[in-house]
Image (cartoon, rainbow, N blue to C red):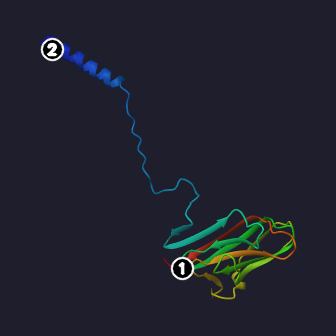
Amino acid sequence: MKNYLITAGIALGVVLLTLTLMPQKVINSVQTLGAVSSPDIMSPYFSFGGVRQWAAHTESLGQATTTVCALQSPAATSTLLTASIRYSVSSTTASTVTMAKATTAYATTTLIGGGSLAANAQGTFNATTTLAQATSLDGVMVFAPSAYLVVGMAGGTGTFSPTGTCQAIWVQNAY
């Protein structure tokens, strides 16, 4: 009986030693959670309290064209909250900046902002609904589904080569 216990103890020791020295397979498990890891949200919209806000932004303005920025509104009727264009450098010539609402990215049908900008100057222009000539609701600009905020430049004899940013925020009227 004593020999059986010694043999069993040696066998158990060999098994434990073998298991300890064997390479272990590590299983990595990744679980996706519903939170974000930074304040930057990659989605073009954000919903809270049953209200969906859409944003559009561009870090580069159009070069050698009269349409320097065209941002598309949501694919639903929406209200423009704010829109702006910031010129870091305008152009080689003085120009007139036009901010408008349009059905295409190349038209300026409903004027909503703009002004004059000197050659090689910096400047910021904001949309204002007081200039609205068409679809407005108590001075607030309403955009049809997939309409555009278009910023154009005109005037002078030089080339339009502005640098800067263009951005807009809309509230979707229903979804």
Report whether 32 appears left or right of 45. left
x, y (%) of residue 66?
Answer: 76, 73
**Residue farthest to the top?**
3
Can you say whether 16 is above or below 136 in the image?
Answer: above
Helix, strand, or loop for circle 1? loop
x, y (%) of residue 34?
Answer: 46, 57
Q: Using the rendered view, name the quadrant where residue 119 is placed.
A: bottom right
The residue that appears at 76% across and 66% down in the rendered structure is 63
Residue count near mark 1 (Cα–Cα under 10 Å), binned few <14, some 14–19, many ≥20: some
Q: Amino acid at mark 1?
A: Asn
Looking at the rendering, in which quadrant would you find the N terminus?
A: top left
x, y (%) of residue 68?
Answer: 73, 70
Q: CA distance from mark 1 to mark 2?
A: 83 Å
The residue that appears at 28% across and 18% down in the rendered structure is 14
Q: Give the mark count.
A: 2
Q: State which tag comes first along the sequence, 1 or 2.
A: 2
Q: Which residue is mark 2?
A: 4
Whether residue 26 is visible to the viewer of this picture, yes or no, is: yes
Helix, strand, or loop for circle 2? helix
Between residue 129 and residue 160, name the one nearer to us. 160
Q: Which residue is mark 1?
A: 173
Q: Using the rendered view, name the quadrant where residue 12 is placed.
A: top left
